[in-house]
Amino acid sequence: MSARSPLFMMVKSGGNREPLWASDIGLGGMQCKSRVPRFPGTYLDLSFTLPGTTDRLEAGGQVLSIDGERQGRLALGLRFCMLSVKAEREIYRFLDRRRALWGPEQLVEATPEGESVARQILDQSRPFEALLLEAYAALRAKELQRLAFVRHLQTGTLPRLSRLAGG
């Protein structure tokens, strides 16, 4: 479960002239509306600017789900792939600034199948902050894994190539 926030922004998708329109975003992905069907498993090059910011963010996205909508639009569930550390931080900061939009009611509505998990989070005094802290801890863990791969933490030197190759 990740902190998510409603929004409205245009998302450009690679060479497609028809843009996507994001309605929801979290650290793991976003939900978009589209007139052009993109089927589950499809990889997209995404480019977008979060509301209230000026930096253009780029990310890979994989279509996880497609649902029918009204007015000829489809709802696409997208998972971020190959998201840069900068983009992760910008999305985290965006979510942190928008925490006032979240209340206990929205959290339960956002996760109808996971209502028991939502109830556990709601028992805390600040549910959105708890989700953000969990997401931030996951970000830090990813950064440490990247550092551990490049630099051997015990000696502070680069690992031997044979060790990286599994030999």
Image (cartoon, helix red, strand yellow):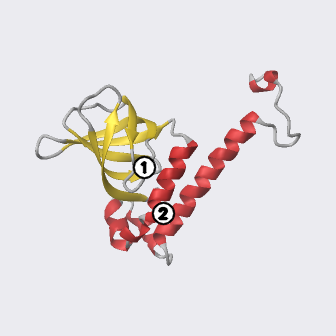
Proximity of marks 2 and 1: CB atoms separated by less than 8 Å: no
Count of all numbered marks drawn on residues in the image: 2
117 in relation to 104, above or below:
above
Residue pictured at 45% horizontal, 46% vertical = 55
Residue pictured at 82% horizontal, 42% vertical = 153
Q: Secondary structure at mark 1?
A: loop
43 in relation to 96, above or below:
above
Q: Secondary structure at mark 2?
A: helix
Q: Residues within 10 Å of mark 1 (few under 14, many from 20)?
A: few
Mark 1 highlights which residue? 54
Q: CA distance from mark 2 to mark 1?
A: 17 Å
Mark 2 highlights which residue? 96
Q: Is residue 92 left or right of residue 30?
A: right
- x%, y% of residue 101? 36, 68
Q: Amino acid at mark 2?
A: Asp
Say which of 57 and 128 sits in front. 57
Q: Is residue 61 left or right of residue 83?
A: left
